[in-house]
């Protein structure tokens, strides 16, 4: 995204050509009240990528102006996620709360210059007097004397008043058609402990005021943000103009808005994601079904696949809905080239090769990755008793079934051709074992007599198999466009009951016993999996093999 041009780069090019800026300095300002998700990742990539394209700098700033939700856990996680994606802020790591004193000083200057006043309207009255498109807003305190507003504001800071008693409002235009300009609140009283400032402050700035001030103090040239702030841009510019004119800051950052990422079957609301975590509907912020970066990492996604996906999505001015299958397609493309192949049987059925010695073990050489000859080969053991997939056997086969069935032959992948002779059943009618005979002359290729064997199935040695559990993940929500919720419905109504299927007693080839947490593999014929980082006895399905999206690209 840093290399290709988009409308943001076009605007920056204009600024550089016109001399409105001689360098590029951006910032990424997440709120430390949750974990970053893939929607934040788009903003992150735009901020850091734009700075990289122009040889500039990008700051990391924790927007901790709202003390009610911040936590150091989230601060640490945000930094880890950014580093995982391959970006760094060098020594430019800041907190919005670092600027509380300066932000307060500038607010006093707004009051002294007649551009702000202390208002006594309650929250209910504020809504009542807000007006509409044909009626201006009203505040009986708008003409409060400057000295009186300044005194009240200082006493607000000193903690003399209860929450809700007073607010500091900008004096702009009560009749503006843009309601953000109708004397917005810049400060409110809150008696709550701040995660870094403790109880030093009992008044806190609103984002619409703090955001441009912080950008100015850090020397930001281009403040890139999502489209919902487009109507806030006049207020951003108003704050920049006022503060630069009488607070001694020669900085004029430009706000540019872009469309946020909307992904099918995916909720980006941090409030609802937090609810999922707190109510136990998911296994924490890193549950592999979540859209958070730590969850995607745990599921097996790679930074390069995520960046590739966001680069293909591009940067737009208008909202759109992106098919999650494109994200999966990008991951498949990468893992097909890089993931080592391994064999796993997730729903095992025992196969006994009756004409193979019970005490014999031989080894077959198979490719670690057919797409990468340099990945080499490995040896897998073959014994009399094997495990195959339940779906690869049918006592009464459906039409065109080309796997194991009584009286027919099938190739054991990389090994012998076998013929199914009989089936042993359990008392409940399930298959206890399938008995076969092997054509022992087919170890190295086709049958001597040239007969055709169409089906090939995978297998593992029963003697050497490694036991493991496997989690099969799917979309967390059944609704394709979660932003188009039917009336009377909530996110809860569309949680997918099959978003995770837990399989126990799976049988894996012995090479997987050495897999480290987070290692990624293609389980042949099944999909891409990785060893779970929290529960190493579990392998998570990252994405299936089938790529329905690829057809749309042709």
Image (spheres, grey):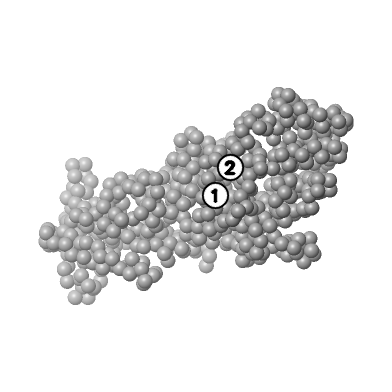
Residue 455, numbered circle: none
Picture quadrant where residue 48 is located: bottom right
Q: Residue furthest bottom?
A: 449
Q: Nearer the viewer, residue 135 or 104?
A: 104
Residue 548 locus on image (x, y percent)? 47, 59
Residue 220 locus on image (x, y percent)? 71, 54
State whether residue 183 appears in this view.
no
The residue wearing badge 2 is 32
Picture quadrant where residue 121 is located: top right
State whether residue 181 appears in this view.
yes
Picture quadrant where residue 359 is located: bottom left
- At 79% from the left and 60% from the top, the residue drawn is 20
Residue 458 locus on image (x, y percent)? 28, 60
Q: Residues within 10 Å of mark 2 (few under 14, many from 20)?
A: many
How far separated are the C-alphas under marks 2 and 1? 10 Å
Is residue 96 rendered to the left or right of residue 271?
A: right
- At 66% from the left and 42% from the top, the residue drawn is 98
Q: Are marks 2 and 1 in contact (CB under 8 Å)?
A: no
Q: Does dot 2 land on a helix, a strand or a loop?
A: loop
Q: Nearer the viewer, residue 143 or 520?
A: 143
Q: Residues within 10 Å of mark 1 (few under 14, many from 20)?
A: some
Q: Does dot 1 land on a helix, a strand or a loop?
A: helix
- At 73% from the left and 35% from the top, the residue drawn is 187
Residue 134 locus on image (x, y percent)? 84, 37
Q: Nearer the viewer, residue 495 or 36?
A: 36
The residue wearing badge 1 is 79
Q: Considering the image in quadrants, where does the N terminus appear?
A: bottom right
Q: Nearer the viewer, residue 29 or 548?
A: 29
Q: Earlier in the sequence, mark 2 or mark 1?
A: 2
């Amino acid at each position: 995204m840093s290399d290709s041009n988009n409308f943001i780069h076009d605007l920056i090019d204009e600024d550089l050509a016109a001399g409105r800026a001689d360098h590029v300095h951006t910032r990424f300002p997440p709120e430390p009240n949750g974990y970053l998700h893939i929607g934040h990742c788009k903003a992150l990539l735009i901020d850091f990528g734009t700075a990289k394209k122009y040889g500039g700098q990008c700051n990391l700033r924790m927007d901790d102006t709202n003390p009610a939700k911040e936590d150091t856990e989230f601060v640490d996680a945000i930094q880890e996620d950014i580093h995982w994606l391959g970006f760094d802020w060098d020594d430019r790591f800041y907190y919005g709360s670092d600027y509380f004193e300066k932000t307060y000083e500038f607010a006093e200057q707004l009051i002294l210059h007649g551009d702000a006043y202390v208002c006594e309207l309650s929250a209910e009255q504020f809504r009542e007097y807000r007006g509409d498109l044909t009626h201006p807003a009203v505040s009986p305190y708008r003409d409060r004397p400057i000295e009186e507003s300044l005194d009240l504001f200082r006493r607000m800071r000193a903690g003399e008043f209860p929450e809700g008693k007073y607010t500091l409002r900008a004096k702009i235009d009560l009749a503006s058609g843009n309601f953000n300009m109708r004397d917005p609140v810049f400060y409110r009283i809150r008696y709550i402990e701040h995660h870094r400032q403790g109880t030093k402050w009992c008044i806190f700035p609103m984002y619409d005021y703090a955001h441009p001030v912080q950008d100015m103090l850090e020397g930001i040239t281009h403040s890139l943000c999502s489209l919902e702030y487009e109507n806030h841009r006049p207020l951003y510019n108003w704050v920049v103009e006022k503060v630069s004119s009488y607070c001694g800051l020669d900085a004029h950052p430009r706000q540019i808005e872009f469309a946020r990422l909307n992904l099918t079957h995916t909720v980006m609301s941090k409030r609802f994601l937090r609810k999922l975590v707190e109510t136990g509907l998911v296994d924490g912020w890193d549950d592999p079904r979540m859209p958070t970066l730590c969850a995607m990492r745990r599921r097996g996604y790679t930074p390069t696949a995520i960046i590739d996906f966001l680069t293909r999505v591009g940067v737009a001015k208008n909202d759109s809905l992106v098919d999650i299958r494109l994200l999966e397609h990008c991951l498949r493309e990468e893992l097909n080239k890089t993931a080592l192949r391994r064999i796993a049987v997730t729903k095992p059925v025992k196969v006994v090769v009756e004409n193979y010695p019970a005490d014999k073990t031989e080894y077959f050489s198979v490719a670690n990755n057919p797409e990468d000859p340099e990945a080499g080969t490995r040896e897998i053991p073959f014994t009399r008793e094997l495990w195959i997939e339940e779906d690869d056997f049918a006592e009464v086969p459906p039409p065109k079934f080309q796997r194991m069935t009584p009286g027919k032959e099938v190739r054991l992948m990389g090994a012998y051709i076998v013929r199914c002779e009989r089936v042993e059943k359990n008392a409940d009618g399930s298959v206890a074992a399938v008995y076969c005979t092997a054509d022992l002359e087919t170890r190295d290729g086709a049958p001597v007599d040239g007969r055709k064997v169409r089906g090939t199935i995978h297998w593992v040695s029963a003697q050497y198999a490694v036991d493991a559990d496997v989690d099969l993940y799917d979309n967390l929500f059944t609704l394709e466009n979660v932003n188009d919720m039917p009336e009377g419905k909530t996110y809860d109504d569309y949680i997918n009951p099959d978003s995770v299927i837990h399989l126990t007693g799976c049988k894996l080839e012995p090479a997987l016993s050495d897999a480290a947490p987070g290692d990624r593999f293609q389980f042949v014929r099944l999909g891409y999996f990785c060893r779970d980082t929290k529960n190493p006895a579990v392998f998570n399905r990252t994405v299936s093999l089938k790529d329905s999206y690829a057809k749309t690209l042709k």
